Image: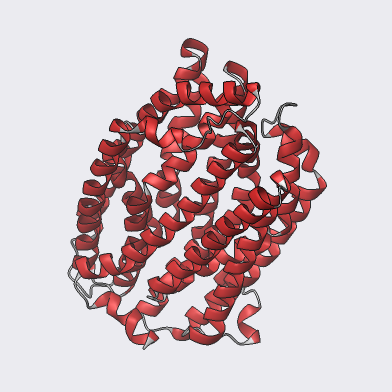
């Protein structure tokens, strides 16, 4: 049955396939982002806004190490999808085995270095004395489990590449539910504060790792032998070339977050860092269906490109942009109308809180809604940039995929964040987001349209030399 489901990527109607792939991915992302939202709400309400500032500065390093798995997963799964499309089962197995080995070795090395240099890194990421101890407490414990997270992120992309999006969804839902439950017990009931929040996150990683290990042992069509785990230069090179695209994008996001934290401290204060922490979680939460469309798009495009079914690839691009665009407009409308309602979830107005915490909460409610509106201002057009960069990665064209995936954060947003704040202060940071979205969409749309005209007008079954 698993084999049939992967073959279905090349035969079933594109709209049906996209829904089958995107809905579970969207639900998984929704639950995962709800987990981050609830986690942040618990911290803000039960510990205070500075706890939000603390996890915001920790995210870049944990995000980057965890993203090793995502990078190897997406890059390798592009190779794996095309191997399945070409009915090359042996290559698919070797690719997956090499993905596991690469993810484990790389993430373990980086986690070790992260623990050795923890004091330096926390300060480099933008923590000041007002919340540094909170950040260190969270950082140390979460890093103990980061290898599990990295393997989970890798395994999840492989599950989708097999044509099993429902299991990929479950792998995201289970740890999210576990984290929310453990947050409540460890922070609210047992009053362990930041330490409780960190251990809840660690436990969620373990839950996800356990489920994904079960899937590949019991359910997967990819039955690995010991030989598959041995690194092969040709396969590693192919995986790495495409993985570098995702890794570079994730590294750029980490650099961006570090830069944002430091610029916000320079032109604002710790509460502006907390505002960004809220906005960054809202970005993932609100955009979950658009990201789901993007994730659902990749295995369909990769499989059909590997099978030389170019008309189906074109249809996949058009359908994904259409559906994603409609969803993006709905999200934009809701955010523009109700920003205060979303921000108010993260702070408490209970009179039992001390005077400083109440004052901080009031200031967060004052600053954040307008910033949220500005950051989401160009939401209706972002699907073109997402699908464009994902397309080149799905078909194995690493250099265009790398350059296009870096357009928003690397080529536009980082320079704008350096240029605008000296003139506009913290406001310059928020207006940099929509400007970067528009510029990156224009550039990506141009190259995607050129690619379609030049390389996707070949007849189905044609194999380029």
Residue drawn at (39%, 85%), measured in percent from left and top?
A: 2
Figure coloring: secondary structure
Q: Quadrant of the N terminus?
A: bottom left
Q: Is residue 373 above or below residue 298?
A: above
Residue 51 appears left or right of 373: right
Is residue 163 visible in the rendered structure shown here? yes
Give the x, y percent position of residue 13.
19, 72
The quadrant where residue 81 appears: bottom left
Q: Position of residue 298 (x, y in %)?
A: 36, 62
Q: Quadrant of residue 271?
A: top right
In the picture shown, does residue 172 fall above or below 201? below
Q: Nearer the viewer, residue 458 or 334?
A: 334
- 42 on left or right of 282: right
Using the image as rendered, state which of residue 225 and residue 360 is in the foreground: 360
Q: Position of residue 92 (x, y in %)?
A: 48, 79
Name the residue rendered at 60%, 30% in the picture.
Answer: 261
């Amino acid at each position: 049955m698993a084999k049939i489901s992967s073959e279905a990527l090349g035969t079933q109607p594109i709209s049906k396939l996209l829904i089958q792939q995107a809905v579970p991915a969207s639900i998984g992302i929704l639950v995962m982002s709800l987990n981050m939202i609830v986690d942040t709400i618990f911290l803000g309400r039960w510990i205070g806004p500075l706890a939000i500032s603390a996890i915001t500065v920790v995210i870049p390093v944990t995000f980057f190490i965890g993203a090793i798995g995502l990078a190897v997963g997406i890059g390798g799964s592009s190779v794996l999808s095309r191997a399945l499309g070409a009915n090359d089962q042996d290559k698919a197995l070797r690719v997956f085995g090499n993905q596991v080995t690469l993810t484990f070795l790389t993430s373990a090395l980086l986690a070790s270095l992260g623990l050795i240099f923890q004091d330096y890194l926390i300060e480099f990421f933008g923590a000041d004395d007002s919340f540094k101890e909170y950040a260190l407490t969270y950082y140390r414990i979460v890093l103990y489990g980061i290898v599990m997270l990295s393997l989970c992120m890798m395994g999840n992309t492989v599950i989708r590449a097999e044509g099993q999006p429902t299991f990929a969804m479950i792998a995201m839902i289970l740890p999210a539910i576990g984290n929310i439950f453990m947050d409540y017990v460890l922070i609210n009931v047992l009053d362990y504060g930041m330490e409780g929040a960190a251990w809840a996150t660690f436990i969620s990683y373990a839950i996800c790792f356990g489920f994904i290990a079960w899937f590949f042992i019991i359910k997967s069509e990819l039955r690995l032998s010991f030989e598959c785990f041995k690194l092969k230069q040709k396969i590693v090179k192919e995986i790495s070339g495409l993985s570098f695209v995702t890794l570079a994008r994730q590294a750029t996001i980490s650099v961006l977050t570090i830069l944002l934290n430091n610029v916000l401290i320079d032109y604002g204060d710790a509460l502006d860092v907390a505002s960004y922490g809220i906005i960054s979680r809202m970005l993932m939460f609100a955009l979950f269906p658009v990201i789901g469309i993007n994730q659902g798009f990749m295995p369909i495009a990769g499989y059909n490109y590997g099978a030389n079914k170019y008309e189906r690839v074109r249809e996949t691009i058009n359908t994904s942009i259409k559906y994603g665009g409609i969803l993006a407009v709905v999200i934009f409308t809701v955010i523009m109308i109700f920003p205060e309602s979303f921000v108010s979830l993260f702070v408490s107005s209970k009179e039992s809180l001390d005077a400083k915490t109440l004052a901080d909460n009031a200031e967060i409610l004052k600053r954040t809604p307008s910033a949220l509106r500005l950051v989401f201002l160009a939401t209706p057009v972002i699907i073109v940039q997402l699908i464009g960069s994902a397309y080149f990665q799905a078909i194995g064209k690493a250099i265009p995929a790398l350059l296009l995936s870096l357009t928003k954060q690397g080529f536009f947003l980082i320079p704008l964040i350096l240029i605008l704040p000296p003139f506009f202060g913290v406001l310059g940071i928020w207006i940099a987001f929509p400007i970067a979205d528009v510029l990156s969409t224009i550039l990506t749309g141009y190259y995607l349209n050129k690619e379609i005209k030049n390389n996707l007008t070949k007849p189905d079954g044609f194999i380029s030399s």
